Amino acid sequence: MSGLRLLQLGDQPGFEVASATLGGHSFERHSHDEFVISANLRGEESVWLDGRTFDAGPGAITSYNPGQIQGGGVAEGQPWQFVSLYIAPDQLASMLGLQRLEFERSSERPPALAGAMADAVERVLGDDAFVRQRGEEHLTLLLAEIARVMGVRLPQEGAESGGRIIELQDWLAADLAQQPSLDEMAAYAGLSKYHLLRSFQKQVGLSPRQWAMQLRTRRAQALLRAGLAATDVAHELGFADQSHLNRHFRAAYGVSPGSFQRALR
């Protein structure tokens, strides 16, 4: 089985994720305008980069700066599976709170990090909107870890972010049906996406998406207690449909909205 799945993340072009399953494939020497970050999951890849060669087997992460000449692949008949991120230079710098950056190392082998990256990519390629959004959050945090592993220094978090997180919580709570994107939340808080997620997790113990979802299910519980029909509750709180409400309500409280209402009678 072979194939390629590709998806744009975020509100603007410049951040794409890909998952590929290929057999005995090789790429001619080429370059990209974007940063390319790949995690090899299966197959012994031989990489050619700027006149030198190296191997990147399963568990390896490779990083390519914009404009670097690259090529390579696996031997004929060998299965090959990997995930890749393609990120415009200004986007990656903005996400991490930097003015500019360049990777110092082209290849490292942190298997746990490669596996986490693959898992996050699979999440953003899925069908469930909440799972996709959580996958985007996870990828953003993983990008900071990848930057450290590959040799990029990140700025320290500022103490002033605490008040911004509280303001963001108030903004999210004021209209739970709005469900802003990660880009919009970062812009509202005046923080990079990475520092927003790090600061929110540190201060609240959840990601912004998780916090908003637990508040939505809590509000749903109150509306169901008041006798509002589950379909109306789903619409009021911005769930895609009643099944979406059912899934998250059951995960939080162990029962469906209908069972919860019947138990109150």
Image (spheres, rainbow, N blue to C red):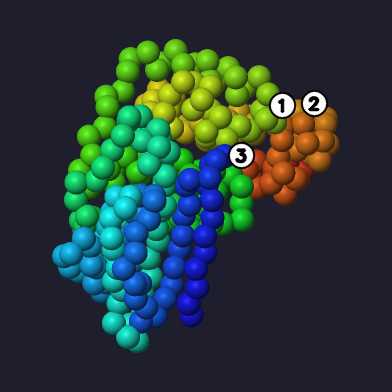
Residue neighbourhood size for the residue with mark 3, other residues' Cα within 10 Å, grouped as few (<14), some (14–19), many (≥20): few
Q: Judge left or right: residue 260 versus residue 79.
A: right
The reply to whether the C-beta atoms of the residues labelled 2 and 1 are less than 8 Å apart is: yes
Q: Quadrant of the C terminus?
A: top right
Dividing the picture into quadrants, the one containing residue 226 is: top right
Q: Secondary structure at mark 3?
A: helix
- In the picture provided, is 108 more to the left or to the right than 215? left
| Residue beneath disc 1 | 222
Q: Secondary structure at mark 1?
A: helix
Of the image marks 1 and 3, the number of the one nearer the N terminus = 1
The residue positioned 48% from the left and 77% from the top of the image is 2
Q: Amino acid at mark 1?
A: Ala
Q: Residues within 10 Å of mark 1 (few under 14, many from 20)?
A: few
Type of residue at label 3? Tyr
Query: 162 or 233, which is in the foreground?
Result: 162
Which disc, if any, is residue 253? 3
Q: Earlier in the sequence, mark 3 or mark 2?
A: 2
> Horizontal and vertical percent for residue 178?
67, 30
Disc 2 is placed on an element classified as loop
Residue, disc 2: 226
Disc 3/disc 2 C-alpha distance (Å): 17 Å
Q: Relative to the observer, which residue lies in front, 107 or 221?
A: 107
Q: Is residue 78 depicted above or below 173 in this figure? A: below
Q: Amino acid at mark 2?
A: Ala
